[in-house]
Image (cartoon, rainbow, N blue to C red):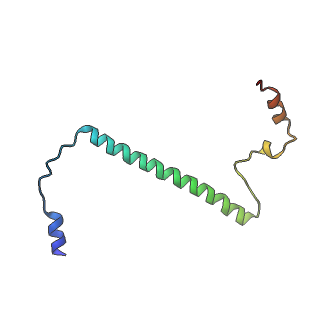
Amino acid sequence: MFFVVGLISYTSPAYAYLDPGTGSMIIQGLVAGLAAIMFVCVAFFKNTWYVLKDFFTGKKSNPVISESEKNPTDNSIQETDKNINI
């Protein structure tokens, strides 16, 4: 234990130069890492929420399909198709 503490507390000169660009690059990497972690958590928990909701309610809910796509006889879809000029 004393040996480990002694090794950790031992200091030696680094002979290195860190310019301001290095600091901003480190901050950019940390921000990007946090954004990636948040994206993965939101995507995972959103999917998990729908699976748990379907399990406990007994209904099949698909958040990707909107109400107008579920009912193909809806006039709003037919009207939008008429307005498209290809």
- Classify residue 80 by image quadrant: top right
Q: Residue furthest top?
A: 85
Seen in the image, is 64 located left or right of residue 19?
Answer: right
Q: In which quarter of the image is residue 28?
A: top left
Horizontal relation, residue 44 to residue 76: left or right: left
- Judge left or right: residue 43 versus residue 51: left
Image check: 77 left or right of 5?
Answer: right
Residue 77, picture quadrant = top right
> Can you say which quadrant of the picture contains the N terminus?
bottom left
Residue 71 sits above or below residue 44 on the image? above
Q: How many marks?
A: 0
Residue that protrudes farthest toward the bottom in the picture = 1
Q: Which residue does the image show at 16% across and 67% down from the upper left? A: 7
Which residue is situated farthest in the right direction here? 73
Whether residue 44 is situated above or below residue 20 in the rendered picture:
below
Which residue sits at x=18%, y=65%?
8
Q: Where is residue 2 in the image (x, y as percent from the top left)?
A: 16, 74
Q: Quadrant of the C terminus?
A: top right
* Residue 32 x, y percent position in the rendering: 42, 46
Residue at point 15%, 73% (across, down): 3
* Residue 78 pos. (x, y %): 84, 33
Q: Which residue is drawn at 78% across and 45% down?
A: 67
Is 4 located above or below residue 34 in the figure? below
